[in-house]
Every structure is written in C-alpha cells, then in structure tokens.
Image (cartoon, rainbow, N blue to C red):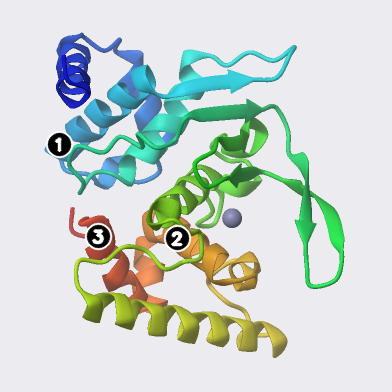
Amino acid sequence: MPFAFWKRWKRRRWSAKTRPPEFERWSNQHVRCWGRLAPDQQQRLQEIAWIMFHERHFETVRGFSVTDEMKWVVVSNAALMLLGVTDYYFDGVQTILIQPEPFILPQKDRWTIHHVASSGAAWQDGPIVLAWSDCQTGSQLRRHGRNVIIHEFAHHLDGLDGEMGGAIHWESSSEAERWDQLLAEELESLQRSLELGHRTLLDPYAATNSAEFFAVACEYFFEEPSAMREHHQELYEMLAKFYHFDPLTP
Ligand SMILES: [Zn+2]
C-alpha cells in the first residue's frame, strides 16, 4: 500500500473514532482563542489535534509522565496554527519531548557560549522540546501574548524551507520579498525601541534575531490578535495570509 494512501487511510480511521468528551473541555480550557472560533473551526481544530494526538510521538524524561491532557494541551495549541492548512499535521515533527521544568541549553553569541534556561527548543528535522511548567495555562510563558507551544511549532514551520531564519514560504516571489523587508524593518524598529527604553507590545526576546522575531510574532498573532493588528498591522495581515487564517474574523 503506497505510503501516502496508507497515511490517509489511517487518518480517516482515527477521524471516525469518537473523542472522549473531556478533550473538548481541555481545548476550551487551554486554547486561549477557543471561544472566538466559529463552531466549524472548533470542530476542525479538534480533528487536527486528534490526528496529531495519534500520530506525533511524545517522550519525556525518567521519573516524569505525560498524561493525555498534557498531550492535548500541546496538540490543540499547535492545531490552531493549521486551521487554514489542508493535509499537514506537523508531519515533520518526529518527537515532542516534554521536560517538567525549563532546561539548560548552550547558546552562542558572537564570541562565547552561554548556558541559559530554556522553556522550549526546536531543531531542523529534529524534536520539539517543551518545558511543561511553561506550557500550562497561566504559567509565565502562557501570559500576555506568550505561548511557548506556538513559538516552537512556528520555528518548525520556519524551518520547512531548510533554514530557521524567519524567511518563511510564500506563494509568490513578491510576497517573499515584501516579507523579508518587513521582517528586517520590524526587527530593527523593535531593537531601536528597546534601546530607547520604550515599552513594546512584543516581548524583548523577539529582538534576538529574525527567527525569534517570527516565532514571537506568531505567539502574539494567535494569542493577542487585536493588539497585534493595532500595533503591527502589516505584519498581522501577512501572518493571516501565511496561515490562511485570521484570528479576528474566523
Ligand atoms: Zn525561539
């Protein structure tokens, strides 16, 4: 049986299986814009998350266990990013590794390597790692427009063209060109505002580089769409085009 056909067949079988009722309660509880979605979008989000729940492989560290609810928190937030997409279920994410707390990662600047506590990480063709303490609703990285799950899955989408650098895939070269310009302008403007000590909507972490800017912008796009559209209108509109989904007019 050809692979693509087998995959579709399995997905049809999972879709036909009844989801336990608590899964919808969990989406309502853990996906911030759940209440803003139209009923057919809520249904679609559940379907995408349900397929990811079966297909994506979860791992954790010794002494910690991952429950169905924890898996659902991850897949339902990631599914939000696929509402405008057909036939992609983060197939390229081989493993989702759940750590109980932030973990130490080496980070290189121009001259030295620092070891910093991280709430998430994503590698090209590799796993996505998430610190469970920051995935939970109300935790540090699930407040004020932040969402570490969306952040790491956005890095994955960014990497689909072979490089995680903020240059995402566009259907036309004119859109790709405008995106590159806009990303550079927005990043520079954020860096300047921070240097001047101004308050910014986006978290200062977005000023790290263009890859982080894109990932943080995606967090705010899904989590705080009104503020995002008000303060970064063109960026908001381009992200709505990229995701084929507008969180403000679902
Ligand atoms: Zn990042």
Residue type at tag 2:
Tyr
Residue type at tag 3:
Leu
Q: Residue 182, image x and y in percent?
A: 40, 82
**Who comes first in sequence, dot 1 or dot 2?**
1
The circle on residue 248 is 3
Question: Considering depth in this image, is 102 or 87 the residue closer to the camera?
Answer: 87
Above or below residue 135? Residue 10 is above
Disc 1: which residue: 39
Question: Considering depth in this image, is 130 or 178 the residue closer to the camera?
Answer: 178
Mark 3 to mark 1 CA distance (whole Å): 15 Å
- Give the residue at x 39% y 37%: 92
Within 10 Å of disc 2 (Cα), the crowding (few <14, some 14-19, many 20+) is: many
Q: Residue 173, image x and y in percent?
A: 24, 77
- Give the residue at x 18% y 59%: 249
The circle on residue 220 is 2
Let me know if residue 223 appears in the view.
no
Above or below residue 45? Residue 170 is below
Q: Nearer the viewer, mark 3 or mark 2?
A: 2
**Who comes first in sequence, dot 3 or dot 1?**
1
Q: Quadrant of ligand 1?
A: bottom right
Q: Residue 157, image x and y in percent?
A: 40, 51
Are the residues at dot 3 and dot 1 in contact (C-beta closer than 8 Å)? Answer: no
- Give the residue at x 26% y 28%: 46
- Relative placement, left or right, of 7 versus 72 is left
Q: Nearer the viewer, mark 1 or mark 2?
A: 2
